[in-house]
Amino acid sequence: MKRVACLAFLYSALVGATYAQGILSAPLKTEVGPAVAVEGDHVAVNGVVFALFGVDAPLRIQWCARDGQKFGCGLEALAALEGLIENQTVTCEQVRDPHLRRRVLRFGRCTIGERDLAAEMVRQGMAMAFPDQSEEYVQLEEEAKASKVGLWAADEFTPPWIWEDTYLNER
């Protein structure tokens, strides 16, 4: 019995290592073209979905509160991203995230010309810097927070990564 368990463990470790190696060695993608907003921090270019690297925005189903009323802050983030990319040519260059849990997502730096979409979303207060991934947008978040724009105008909101964990655990 111990031998079967040991073989099963070795097999799963080998399959896992092979799978992870495939992800890590896969070539990085670059896509250029019209884009569609999938979430407030995800765009699809030529059918390839990229999560904006270094930021996190509320999911479209996330609610926040302003003036004592619930509102769809996730829908507002999605609308803000749609407004940025409408009728534009978007370039997304894939970036690897070494964090094992996030390897299933394709992260990218997405731009319109020299304009960084992640930076614009944080500047508008519609996405938050995600310092576990990158410190690049932390200063922009502080500026948006001080100006009380976007999510920062809400009386109450939960950072997207906390809201997602809470929501998924409640289901």
Image (cartoon, rainbow, N blue to C red):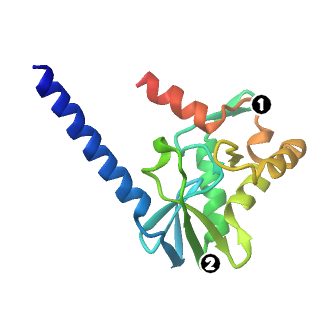
Percent across and percent down for residue 75 are 59, 48
Percent across and percent down for residue 94 are 54, 66
The residue that label 2 is drawn on is 88
Count of picture labels: 2
* Circle 2 or circle 1, nearest the eye: 2
Amino acid beneath label 2: Gln
- Residue 4 lies left or right of residue 153; in this view the side is left
Q: Nearer the viewer, residue 136 or 15?
A: 15
When asked about the image quadrant of residue 128, the answer is top right
Up/down of 94 relative to 19, above or below: below
Percent across and percent down for residue 146 are 90, 42
Amino acid beneath label 1: Asp
Residue drawn at x 46%, y 53% as measured from the top left: 105
Label 2 to label 1, Cα distance in Å?
Answer: 33 Å
Check disc 2 and report its element: helix, strand or loop.
loop
- Residue 79 lies left or right of residue 149; in this view the side is left
Check disc 1 and report its element: helix, strand or loop.
loop
Up/down of 157 relative to 147, above or below: above
- Residue 112 lies left or right of residue 97; in this view the side is right
The residue that label 1 is drawn on is 155
Percent across and percent down for residue 40 are 59, 53
